[in-house]
Amino acid sequence: MSSTNRKSSGDCLLAIDTATELCSVALMNADRPIIERQALDPRGHSRLLLEMIEEVLEDGGLARSEITAVSYDSGPGSFTGIRIGAGVAQGLALGLNVPLLGISSLMILSQNVCDELGPEKPVLAAIDARMNQVYWGLLRQDSASVSGWRWLETPKVSDPGELANFVEGCVGVGSGWDSYATTFQQTKTASWVPSRFPDASSQMHIAKRLIASGIKETWQEALPTYVRDKVTH
């Protein structure tokens, strides 16, 4: 790509999300609109990811060398998906010598629905962890936090029935709700948003805040957060 076609004018952030069934990539150049590619293809992440990165760069008229920071979904979620995203993100950050941010899938899910709820409502984000368990965390929007979110319950893996103690007054989101909403609501009911996955454009909003606050991890520090050690997928 010739330099005359490039349009970089400040921070150029690349976000990668492969932690669940959805594979997505987003690019933001300064304050221009986010460019995104996504596909719901659980077994296609390794095939799709590099192609998507090249597509968003081409659409933005940018070269890889103009990326100033990389973020990726560090989990919890699919072990295989997280490894794919981490490997590509770490390789890019190392090769380009730029900061790398690992951002929680549960925080990204919460960001995905934040425009649909008031800031006073906590979000109970849950991802189906297979083996009749869920990865989950409880978050609330917090303008005083550099990420824009505050953990009320940090990421953990549990049997679905344990979440019944936390649903009251929350908004639910994630594949854990799609699979276990009835179990979660054994004693209390909650509003929840179906069929949502962590995605790169939602991740981008968090990454932008972190970069603006001066949070710049190196590729060695931005490690995956598997939560559970036993590999299932």
Image (cartoon, helix red, strand yellow):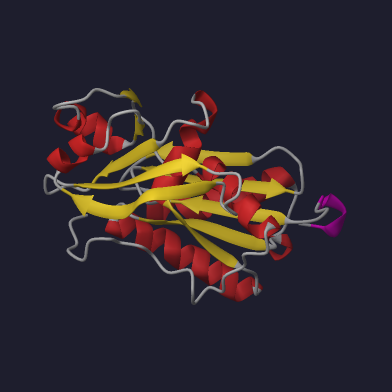
Question: Residue at position x 54%, y 62% from top?
Answer: 101
| Screen quadrant of the C terminus | bottom left
Viewer-side residue, 48 vs 233:
233
In this rendering, position of residue 95 left or right of residue 59: left
Where, by quadrant of the figure, is residue 186 drawn?
A: top left
In this rendering, position of residue 12 left or right of residue 49: right
Q: How many marks?
A: 0
Q: Position of residue 159 (x, y in %)?
A: 14, 46
> Does the segment drawn in magenta span residue 88?
no
In this rendering, position of residue 212 left or right of residue 158: right
Q: Position of residue 183 (x, y in %)?
A: 14, 31
In this rendering, position of residue 114 left or right of residue 151: right
> Does the segment drawn in magenta span residue 6?
yes
Q: Position of residue 190 (x, y in %)?
A: 29, 24
Viewer-side residue, 194 vs 65:
194
Question: Residue at position x 48%, y 35% from top?
Answer: 112
Question: Residue at position x 57%, y 67% from top?
Answer: 92
| Screen quadrant of the N terminus | bottom right
Q: Is residue 94 above or below residue 175?
A: below
Viewer-side residue, 123 vs 17:
123
Residue farthest toward the right in the current orientation of the protein: 4
Question: Residue at position x 84%, y 58% from top?
Answer: 3
**What span is colored magenta in the figure?**
2-7
Viewer-side residue, 167 vs 78:
167
